C-alpha cells in the first residue's frame, strides 16, 4: 500500500479552501494508495477547521487539521511535511486551486512508470472573463513532454518522495519565508541529491483567478517579484560572486526591454508589454543586487 499525504497550506481563503477540498472528494484515488489530507492554517486564530471537518464528514479520505501560528508560508509548509508523518509521498497544491478528477492518478501513473522521486504537472488559470492574448499568455503554465526530467518545480501541482524531504533541513528554506521561491529551491536541492523529478502534462490543476490579477499592473508586479525572488533563491544556493555575475545580464535585459517598448505605438500593446516585462524584470534584479528583497508574504 502506497501512503500519500496531500499537504495544503491556507490563510484566510475559506471559500477557496472549501472548493479545493471538495475537488479532492471528487477525484479518483489510485489503486493500492492510502490517501490523507493535511491542512495547515497559518494564522494566529482558527478560521478554517470547521470547513475541514465539514468536508471530512462527506469524504472517504482522512483529513487532519493543524494551526501553525509562526508567520510565513515556509513555516506552514514545513509543518505540513512534519504532520505527514511516515508516508511514502507528499503531494502539494494551493488553497486557490482545484484539481482534476484524474490529478492524483496521473501523478502516480507517471511516478510508477519511471520510479520517479517527484512528478510535477501544469496549473492552468481560470479567468473571470475573456482576456486579450497578451495578458492571458503571461499566465500559461510552463510545459514539458510526458516523462521529461525537470530540475525544479512549483508546489502548485507536485508529488515528492518523502524520503528526500526528510533528507533536507526544513525541508523548505526559512530564509525564503517572506519572499517565496522556497519550492523552486527545494526541488533543485532534491535534484542535486540525485532525485529525479518528471513532468506529466495530464496531471492538471486549475488556479482560480480574481479580476485584480487579470491586469497589466498585476503582470508587472508579478514580474518584479519573480525576478527579485528568483535571483535571491539562486543566490542562496551558491553565494560567491553571484550578484556581480548577474549584473551584465540584467543591464542587457533592461536595454533590450527599452528597445521593445519605444516603438509601442507601431506594434501595439502586446509588443509594449513584452518590453515592459523585460524592463521590470531587470529592475527586480537590480534591487536584489542592492540587497532589497521583496516581502510578498509578510
Image (cartoon, grey):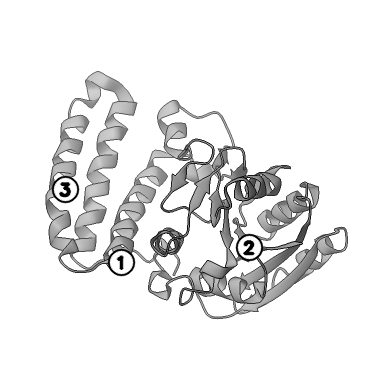
Which image quarter is the N terminus in?
A: bottom right
Please name the residue that numbered disc 2 is placed on: 89
Whether residue 209 appears in this view of the structure is yes
In the image, 155 versus 285, the foreground residue is 155
Q: Earlier in the sequence, mark 3 or mark 2?
A: 2
Distance (Cα) linking label 3 and label 2:
38 Å
Please name the residue that numbered disc 1 is placed on: 237
State whether residue 32 is above or below residue 252. below
Disc 3: CA contacts within 10 A as few (<14), some (14-19) or many (>=20) = few
Q: Tell us which disc is closer to us: 1 or 2.
A: 2
Please name the residue that numbered disc 3 is placed on: 249
Give the residue displayed 22% in from the left and 49% down from the top.
282
State whether residue 210 is above or below residue 187. above
Taking the image as shown, residue 157 lies to the left or right of residue 168, namely right
Q: Earlier in the sequence, mark 1 or mark 2?
A: 2
State whether residue 84 is above or below residue 129. below
Q: Tell us which disc is closer to us: 1 or 3.
A: 1
SS at mark 1 in the image: helix
Amino acid at each position: 500500500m502506497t501512503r500519500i499525504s496531500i499537504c495544503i497550506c491556507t490563510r484566510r481563503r475559506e471559500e477557496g479552501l472549501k472548493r479545493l477540498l471538495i475537488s479532492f472528494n471528487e477525484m479518483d484515488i489510485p489503486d493500492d494508495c492510502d490517501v490523507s489530507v493535511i491542512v495547515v492554517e497559518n494564522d494566529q486564530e482558527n478560521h478554517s477547521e470547521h470547513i475541514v471537518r465539514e468536508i471530512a464528514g462527506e469524504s472517504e479520505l482522512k483529513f487532519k487539521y493543524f494551526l501553525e501560528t509562526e508567520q510565513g508560508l515556509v513555516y506552514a509548509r514545513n509543518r505540513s511535511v512534519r504532520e505527514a508523518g511516515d508516508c511514502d509521498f507528499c503531494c502539494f497544491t494551493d488553497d486557490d486551486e482545484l484539481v482534476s478528477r484524474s490529478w492524483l492518478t496521473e501523478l502516480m501513473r507517471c511516478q510508477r512508470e519511471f520510479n520517479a522521486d517527484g512528478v510535477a504537472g501544469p496549473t492552468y488559470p481560470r479567468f473571470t472573463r475573456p482576456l486579450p492574448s497578451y495578458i492571458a499568455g503571461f499566465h500559461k503554465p510552463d510545459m514539458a513532454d510526458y516523462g521529461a526530467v525537470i530540475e525544479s518545480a512549483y508546489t502548485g501541482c507536485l508529488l515528492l518522495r518523502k524520503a528526500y524531504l526528510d533528507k533536507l533541513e526544513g525541508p523548505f528554506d526559512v530564509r525564503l519565508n517572506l519572499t517565496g521561491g522556497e519550492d523552486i529551491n527545494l526541488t533543485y536541492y532534491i535534484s542535486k541529491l540525485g532525485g529525479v523529478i518528471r513532468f506529466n502534462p495530464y496531471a492538471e490543476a486549475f488556479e482560480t483567478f480574481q479580476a485584480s490579477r487579470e491586469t497589466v499592473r498585476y503582470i508587472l508586479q508579478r514580474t518584479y517579484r519573480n525576478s527579485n525572488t528568483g535571483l535571491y533563491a539562486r543566490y542562496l544556493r551558491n553565494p560567491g560572486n553571484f550578484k556581480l555575475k548577474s549584473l551584465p545580464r540584467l543591464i542587457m535585459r533592461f536595454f533590450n526591454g527599452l528597445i521593445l517598448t519605444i516603438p509601442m505605438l507601431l506594434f501595439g500593446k502586446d509588443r509594449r508589454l513584452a518590453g515592459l516585462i523585460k524592463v521590470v524584470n531587470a529592475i527586480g534584479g537590480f534591487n536584489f543586487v542592492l540587497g532589497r528583497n521583496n516581502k510578498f508574504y509578510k
